[in-house]
Amino acid sequence: MSVSLIVHLTPRSSANRIKAWENGRLLVSVTAPPVDGAANKALTELLSSSLGFRKSDVRILSGETSRTKRISIDHLEEADVLNRIQEAIERSR
C-alpha cells in the first residue's frame, strides 16, 4: 500500500517546514537550493522526519526538476498520512 500526494515545494526558503494543505496540494518550504537534487533530498528528509516515516518510504514519483511534485509514501494508509500531515502543519504555526 502507498499514498500519493501532490507537493508544491519552495526551495531557498528561510526555514524547512510543512506550511499548509491547499487546493489538494501540500505546501512545503526548504532552505536547500534547487541544485543537484538538494531541495528534493531536503523535501524527503523533512517529510520523513516531520511525519514519522522512514526515509526509504518517501519517493518522488514525478517532478524532480519542478516545484510541483508527485510523491509516494509507502506502508501507510491514506487516513494516517493525512492525520500526520495535519499535525505537522499545526506544529509549524
Image (cartoon, rainbow, N blue to C red):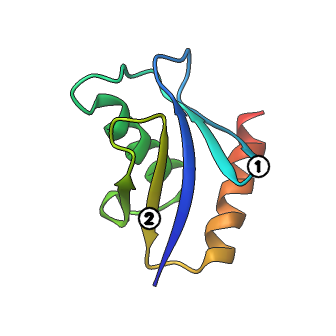
* Residue 24 spot, x, y in % from top left: 71, 54
Q: Is residue 42 left or right of residue 51?
A: left
Determine whether the residue tagged by mark 2 lies in a helix, strand or loop: strand
| Amino acid found under the numbered disc labelled 1 | Asn
Where does the C terminus fall, quadrant-wise?
top right
In the figure, 78 relative to 52: above or below? below
- Residue on which the image places disc 1: 23
Residue at the left extreme of this rendering: 36
Verify CB contact (< 8 Å) between mark 2 and mark 1. no
Whole-angstrom CA distance, mark 2 to mark 1, is 18 Å
Q: Is residue 86 left or right of residue 81?
A: right
* Residue 47 spot, x, y in % from top left: 49, 49
| Amino acid found under the numbered disc labelled 2 | Ser
N-terminal label among 2 and 1: 1
Q: Residue at x 29, y 29 (%)?
A: 38
- Residue on which the image places disc 2: 72
Determine whether the residue tagged by mark 1 lies in a helix, strand or loop: loop
In the figure, 1 relative to 48: above or below? below
Q: Residue at x 46, y 16 (%)?
A: 12
Q: Nearer the viewer, residue 75 or 50?
A: 75
Q: Residue at x 61, y 67 (%)?
A: 81
Q: Nearer the viewer, residue 35 or 17?
A: 35
